[in-house]
Image (spheres, rainbow, N blue to C red):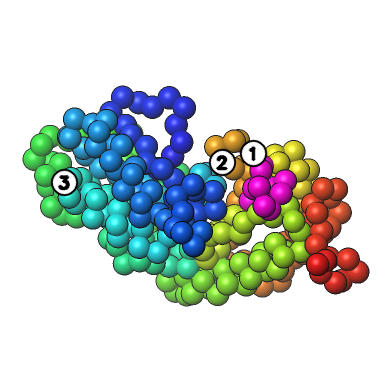
């Protein structure tokens, strides 16, 4: 699911589901992800010997440009895997533990992966990761002699922190908080998009969002220089901002405030972003004296 310059032998990459930029379109111009996914699998089948192990993907592609999966995509991916006797492995290092408005992002479509990997949000800053799977897969791995060993396996300190993180997320209803705050975040970002022509697309779910910066909304041509200027200006104004300037990342601001963030902090961050767009040359304001240009 990622763009690789040098692939490890035996690995194949499927097209990233980029609804904003994909060339696969229905007659009405909407994103034809089904044809794109089928095309990707045909390429994989032609390039492989048929002994395929698993698909590894994120429910929202973060470093790939904050790409959300189209409705039905994950279910279709699972079906492709099952037809080929493959496992579906979901990496929820960033999306898991409430970030996207569900405890785990795969719950949004009700598709259960065969293997789930967690880190980052689970340890809340401490080095902690987890692999979650079924008893059947664990037993088959054991029977076939698979061995995973690390010096810090079952380290009690990060394990205790991980348990406490999960306890607090459930106790304080932070999944619902993330969902509600996410609606406010995405609504405000859509307003920002309506005001500045350099914002080509706003996407994401919950408290995980992306803003793609472009030189022109019609051609969607990238402008990494403007993205860098905006990032510098936001930093100047006191907001820690991150934009993926690498070509494969698409010049996208990756926005992921803490799921404990208050409405006041969220509004402050959004107001700083607004000021950065207002005071940076080249953002192509669509408003003059409060009125939208026509």
Q: Residue furthest right?
A: 289
Range of residues picked out in magenta: 212-222
Q: Are marks 1 and 2 in contact (CB under 8 Å)?
A: yes
Counting residues from the start of the chain, the first of labels 2 and 3 encountered is 3
Report which residue position mark 3 lands on: 85
Relative to 165, residue 143 above or below: above
Q: Residue 270: x and y, percent?
A: 72, 63
**Picture quadrant of residue 109:** bottom left
Report which residue position mark 2 lands on: 249
Q: What number is the disc on residue 245?
A: 1
Front-most of residues 70 and 35: 35
Front-most of residues 149 and 199: 199
* Whether residue 262 can be seen here: no
Work out which quarter of the rendered image holds the N terminus and state it.
Answer: top left
Q: Tag 1's secondary structure?
A: loop
Magenta segment includes 219: yes
Q: Residue furthest left?
A: 143
Q: Tag 2's secondary structure?
A: helix
Relative to 264, residue 2 above or below: above
Q: CA distance from mark 3 to mark 1?
A: 38 Å
| Pointer 2 local density, CA inside 10 Å: few below 14, some 14–19, many at least 20 | some
Q: Which residue does the image show at 12% across and 34% down from the upper left?
A: 145
Q: Which residue does the image show at 71% across and 41% down from the upper left?
A: 223
Q: Residue 210: x and y, percent?
A: 59, 55
Magenta segment includes 94: no
| Pointer 3 local density, CA inside 10 Å: few below 14, some 14–19, many at least 20 | some
Q: CA distance from mark 1 to mark 2?
A: 7 Å
**Picture quadrant of residue 164:** bottom left
């Amino acid at each position: 699911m990622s763009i690789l310059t040098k692939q490890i032998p035996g690995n194949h990459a499927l097209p990233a589901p980029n609804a904003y930029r994909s060339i696969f379109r229905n007659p009405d111009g909407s994103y034809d992800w089904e044809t794109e996914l089928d095309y990707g699998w045909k390429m994989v089948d032609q390039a492989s010997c048929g002994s395929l192990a698993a698909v590894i993907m994120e429910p929202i592609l973060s470093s790939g440009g904050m790409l959300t999966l189209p409705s039905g995509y994950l279910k279709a991916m699972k079906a492709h895997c099952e037809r080929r006797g493959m496992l579906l492995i979901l990496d929820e290092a960033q999306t898991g533990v409430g970030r996207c408005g569900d405890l785990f992002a795969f719950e949004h479509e009700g598709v259960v992966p065969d293997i789930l990997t967690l880190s980052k949000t689970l340890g809340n800053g401490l080095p902690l990761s987890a692999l979650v799977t079924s008893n059947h897969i664990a037993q088959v791995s054991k029977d076939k002699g698979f061995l995973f060993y690390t010096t810090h396996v079952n380290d009690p300190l990060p394990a205790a922190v991980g348990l406490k993180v999960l306890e607090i997320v459930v106790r304080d209803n932070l999944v619902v908080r993330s969902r509600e705050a996410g609606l406010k975040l995405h609504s405000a970002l859509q307003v920002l998009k309506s005001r500045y022509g350099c914002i080509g697309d706003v996407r994401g779910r919950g408290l995980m969002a992306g803003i793609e910066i472009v030189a022109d909304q019609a051609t969607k041509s990238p402008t990494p220089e403007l993205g860098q200027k905006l990032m510098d200006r936001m930093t100047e104004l006191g907001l820690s901002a991150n934009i993926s300037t690498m070509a494969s990342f698409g010049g996208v601001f990756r926005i992921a405030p803490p799921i404990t963030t208050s409405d006041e902090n969220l509004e402050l961050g959004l107001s700083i972003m607004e000021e950065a767009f207002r005071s940076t040359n080249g953002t192509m304001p669509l408003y003059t004296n409060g009125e939208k240009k026509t």
